[in-house]
Image: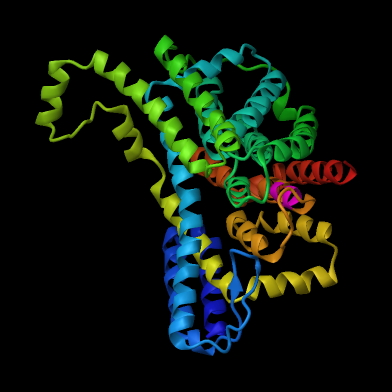
Amino acid sequence: METFILLVFIIGYLLITLEHTIKIDKLIPALGMMALAWAGVALGLDDFTQWFDSANYSMLDGFVGMEHKEKLHVMEETLLHHFGKTCEILIFLMGAMTIVEIIDHFDGFVAIKDFIKTNKKRTLLWIIAFLAFILSAIIDNLTATIVLITLLRKILHSNKDRLWFAGLIVVAANAGGAWSPIGDVTTTMLWIGEKVSTGKLVTELLLPSLVCMLVPTFIASFLTPFKGEFSSEGEIGKKTKVGSRILYLGLGMIVFVPIFKTVTHLPPYIGMMLSLTVVSLVAEIISNRKFSLTDFQDDLAGGGHGAHSPTMRALSRIEMPSILFFLGILMTVAALESLGMIFTFGGQVREVIPDNLFVILLGAGSAVIDNVPLVAASMGMFDMPTDAGIWHFIAYAAGTGGSMLIIGSAAGVVAMGMENISFGWYLKKISGLALAGYLAGAAVYLLL
């Protein structure tokens, strides 16, 4: 049965990797392999000779000699444990996504355009790179990429020019997401899993991540596409006081979450729910002030329920397919971890190659394979304490390594869709820059 579960994982993974080739959304194989993997665990429960205790990160003593009912009880407890830990991540992400959508509802991101006051391509590159680096640390790399490419469409008329800028946005956004506990799904996983703390993550990875952004941006600034001037296509929209206030409130409340966790020692998703409450309350008050009887009648005529509500609208716009994809991936890896496969494999790998080399290869692998399951797997391989160096290096490698291929990160995939960037073009033009940044940042981390 272990072979069956492993095959389910491999085939499901292959289908996820070939998503754009076979035209099947990665959500489908992710959920399918989760269900089949745990079905395999349940059906073969009496035949397994070992079981991994995820709570204590060690193999469970006396599992072989247990009765069927005892093993069933252990499996149910383990399943509930993993589901609870996974839901902590998913609820956290849903809260962050909703806050971002509320900001967008009030056109809050228009205020960011105030930072762009130039008609030189090289200067614009540096401004966009730093904005991506900073924004991704606050609102996550995926959202920062969407916001900045949307801005670029209003600033640069030529799609050919935007391709280059979009490629560097992906690199800078992934670098910015690596040093923040809320900047990337993988760092969020490590943070919620208590592998890293906010303070240590920032102090250990800020400089390597900054170098990972600076090196490719510096090299790119000498390339032909970033020479000369451009003429802006037009204004992105009208900046309003309400939009700016919601932007600063939303970003401030997201940044408040790590502070809340440090003070209360409660899981991050509780702090995120508090932040969502505050932002939603303010948004509802602002909307109600502008709400008229005509809007209410139009809402009833259209059969809508609370269409005027920014919170309801934001909840309807969040990326639920991504949330369910993460559920499928994380719970599938949990099945492999529960059988001790990942822990055993991790021990074998560490006997053959040094930990640092393994992490560098893991980062390179995240460019080909989604970094979420790689990090989930690595969390079951190592039994190091919180803030051990290996966890920070994994956060850096998994967060930035995906930039080397357009399909290697969520930011890359969304840029690919928004600007029709081909796999081949990115490989030829951007991958080398991303590789230089990745290795330079890794070298800085190891030297420190």
Can you say whether 186 is above or below 306 in the image? below
Going 65% across and 66% down the picture, which residue do you hit?
A: 57
Q: Quadrant of residue 240?
A: top left
Going 69% across and 65% down the picture, which residue do you hit?
A: 381
Q: Is residue 343 left or right of residue 266?
A: right
Q: Is residue 96 visible?
A: no
Q: What colouring does the structure picture have? A: rainbow
Q: Quadrant of residue 72?
A: bottom left
**432 and 356: which is toward the camera:** 356
Q: Position of residue 242 (x, y in %)?
A: 40, 13
**33 and 170: which is toward the camera:** 33
**68 and 315: which is toward the camera:** 68
Going 68% across and 16% down the picture, which residue do you hit?
A: 120
Quadrant location of the C terminus in the rendered image:
top right
Can you say whether 363 is above or below 175 in the image? below
**272 and 378: which is toward the camera:** 272
Q: Position of residue 338 (x, y in %)?
A: 57, 72
From the image, give the main secondary structure of the stretch colored magenta.
helix
Q: Is residue 167 left or right of residue 92?
A: right
- Please count the marks in the image: 0
Q: Position of residue 248 (x, y in %)?
A: 50, 19
Name the residue furthest right: 447
- Looking at the rendering, the stretch of residues picked out in magenta corresponds to 391-395
Q: Position of residue 152 (x, y in %)?
A: 55, 25
Q: Is residue 173 visible?
A: yes
Going 34% across and 38% down the picture, which residue do you hit?
A: 315
Whether residue 244 appears in magenta in the rendering, the answer is no
